[in-house]
Amino acid sequence: MASENIQRPEGAGEDWTVRQGWENYSSAEHAMWDRLFDRQAKMLVGRVAPEFLDGLDILRLSKPGIPNFEELNERLTKATGWQVVAVPGLVPDDVFFDHLANRRFVSGNFIRTPEQLDYLQEPDIFHDVFGHVPLLANPVFADYMEAYGRGGQRALRHGGLENLARLYWYTVEFGLIQAADGLRIYGAGIVSSYGESIFALDDASPNRIGFNLKRLMQTDYRIDDYQQSYFVIDSFEDLLSQTLNTDFAPLYADLADARAYATDTLLPGDRVFTQGTQDYATGKAAAA
């Protein structure tokens, strides 16, 4: 939800928040939430990290209709001290990091139209709430998100924003985890996408690579299609530990003049779960 060089919309507060306006959602908008929720919830069983499903139960997100943030926050704050705040769209980086550092997750307050069922450019309330919020009920992942927000504030001072954005992309948005019974998805960009929920685990095309902080922060990513590489964490505890125990300032200095790896790159030192064929990406490029 972060971006650069955007103007604060009329009606938004100094922190860019707005009222959710839950009472203004139409029956069609509530029905769209239910349609998306039912489709994703059914197919995610056995594919998503157990902690995500636990979060759905703790927060009672299966209740019909778009969640009311006031009710949702009662349960979320009780679980981990987090809350969801509504914003009218993308927010500046410094505002985004400040909210995360203070355990506030920003969510768009609009929902996609039927024409945008499987893809929209700007995150909506389904992506933000269904995709992100269940894991915020997990204490370890909740701590990671706060740590990321504080790290973002430091990155702004050290000129490391591009590198840190890759960490968010390949964990919070498009991360995989090694669970006891195999790879599972946890990144919100996958969890909220019907197609990528299948592609990320089942397709032979993408690389699946063991998490390495520096390597990941040097790797480009796709914003326009399914990922060509996914990074696999061993556990949320390990992800949090590496984030808290790494001095990012010298890491940013090392990466400042380093070339970025292409999205499909495999390196000799990678811990490779799957060496992808890249057939999906090359097929799309050939057809363009």
Image (cartoon, helix red, strand yellow):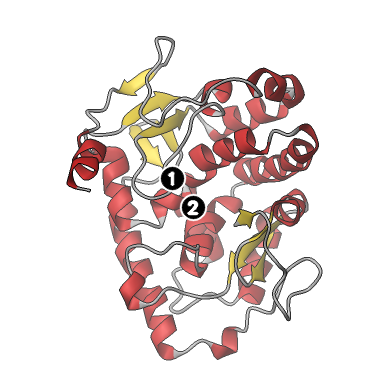
Q: Which residue is mark 1?
A: 50
In which image quadrant can residue 245 be found?
top right
Give the quadrant of the N terminus: bottom right
In which image quadrant can residue 185 be found?
top left
- What type is the residue that disc 2 sits on? Asp
In space, the residues marked 2 and 1 are separated at their CA atoms by: 6 Å
> Residue visible at 63% across and 21% down?
257
> Residue visible at 52% across and 39% down?
171
| Residue 57 appears in the figure | no
- What type is the residue that disc 1 sits on? Pro
Q: Which residue is mark 2?
A: 54
| Residue 99 appears in the figure | yes
Which x, y percent locates residue 272? 35, 19
Q: What residue occupies the far top of the structure in this picture?
A: 268
Q: Which mark is residue 214?
A: none
Within 10 Å of disc 1 (Cα), the crowding (few <14, some 14-19, many 20+) is some
